Amino acid sequence: MQVATSNIIKSPINLKSSKEWSFANVGRAETNYITHSYHRYPAKFIPQIVQKLIYEYTHPNDIVVDPFGGCGTTLVEAKLAGRKSYGFDINPVAKLITQVKITPIKPETLNNSLNKFINIYKVTPPISPVINIDRITYWFDTHIIIELNRIYNAIKALKNYKVRRFYLCAFSHILKNCSRWLMKSTKPQIDPNKLIPAPFDVFLHHLRSMINRNSQFYSILQQNGISEVETKMRISDSTKKLPIPSNSVDLIITSPPYVTSYEYADLHQLPLLWFGNDHEYFKKWGRHAKDFDNFRKKFIGTSLRKKSRSKTLNSPTAEKIIMQLSKKDVGVCNNVTHYFSDMNKSLNEMFRILKPGHKSCIIIGDTMLQGSYIANSQVAAEQMQNIGFIPAKFIKREVSNKLITPWRDSENGKFTNKNNPKKKKAYEYEYIVIMEK
């Protein structure tokens, strides 16, 4: 349901969910069409929301920006719509995934590369890599490390840079499958009973799927004459000044991280650790992998930040939430304070880059922490208004059970069912906060 401007500041909890924006009939296959299925990514928003916002608020050749670029959903949809787009994220894994997803490659090129790769793989010796990072041996069995290294070395022997990067994305995707990681958990933990598949079989299966999806993507762009539409992803911290001019962006679409719901760096650690272990090929990744604990602290929404003296919440609801949490858990209170303060910095930066009269769309969900309701959507709306945004629409949408299992185990974070006595419902609704500069 859309809320009138005068009521935008009121709590969204009591809003009726919008059928138009809930996409109840959209299943996993529809959300994973073309390049959206290249790589798993936690808590990503569905492309149908982005598509609808782009066509509602932009024209061809307009500029769309996603300050929390993630796996590139906004950028893919912007390219399909013929809009220029720029994404920013602090995580190099996100950049790799997005670059591959937004870069169409001639189908013949990829088809020809497959036989070349298989032939290279056959003559690549199965040797163990030099392990510079101990966590690799924590997550992977020795024989799996040797087989993964064989695939990895064969990929690096491919001469075409775009093709090689395409293969590295496929390799990154299979690392979780081939590790000891408990697949259905939202937290990094070992599955002692996991049957780990043969890496080469898993890799080829996913690679062939990606090649087919690329063909579809390439064909759509060619038919519509939009293959050359500018689309870029860069490493950048959204709480600081983004490398983009003031008053230059036509539309912002983004889904910020949720406070302490996921440790995003942890969930992406396998590709970061593997590629970062290769100091020659992935020079910049090495410093993050080597100093992983410090890298984790840079993410918005993390619970790993140290207490900071300077914080601006810019929201009465945020102040109230912090007051409630301070009586229950000082650590959680500090984490949420950091989160709201960082979000305020990011929203200020969004205001700077947006053109006057244009929209910023924030897709965000509310959470529960220590028995307190964390009204992230309400806080974001208040912060945006206090920065200078003008309320436009506030939409409540139901998160489809077809796309995400609503029940999770309260102790281990694993997906579960409604019969589990430890179940908790997570992310039943999310909100689209739309404001104008």
Image (cartoon, helix red, strand yellow):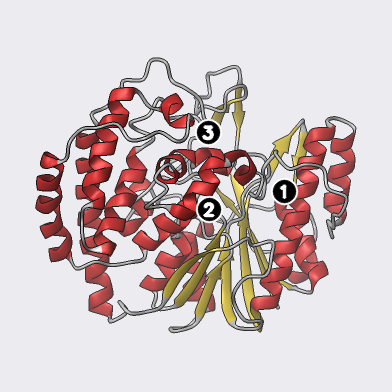
Amino acid marked by disc 1: Ile
Q: Is residue 321 visible?
A: yes
N-terminal of the two: label 1 or label 3? 1
Residue where numbered disc 3 is placed: 186
The N terminus is located in which quarter? Answer: bottom right
Distance from the alpha carbon under mark 2 to that under mark 3? 18 Å
Q: Nearer the viewer, mark 1 or mark 3?
A: 3
Q: Is residue 13 above or below residue 87?
A: above
Residue where numbered disc 2 is placed: 91
Residue at x-position 60% and y-position 36%? 426
Q: Position of residue 104 (x, y in %)?
A: 28, 67
Say which of 432 and 158 sits in front.
Answer: 158
Residue at x-position 49% and y-position 44%? 42
Q: Secondary structure at mark 1?
A: helix
Distance from the alpha carbon under mark 1 to that under mark 3? 25 Å
Residue where numbered disc 1 is placed: 13
Q: Is residue 433 above or below residue 131?
A: below
Distance from the alpha carbon under mark 2 to that under mark 1? 32 Å
Q: Nearer the viewer, mark 2 or mark 1?
A: 2
Residue at x-position 57% and y-position 40%? 292
The C terminus is located in which quarter? Answer: bottom right
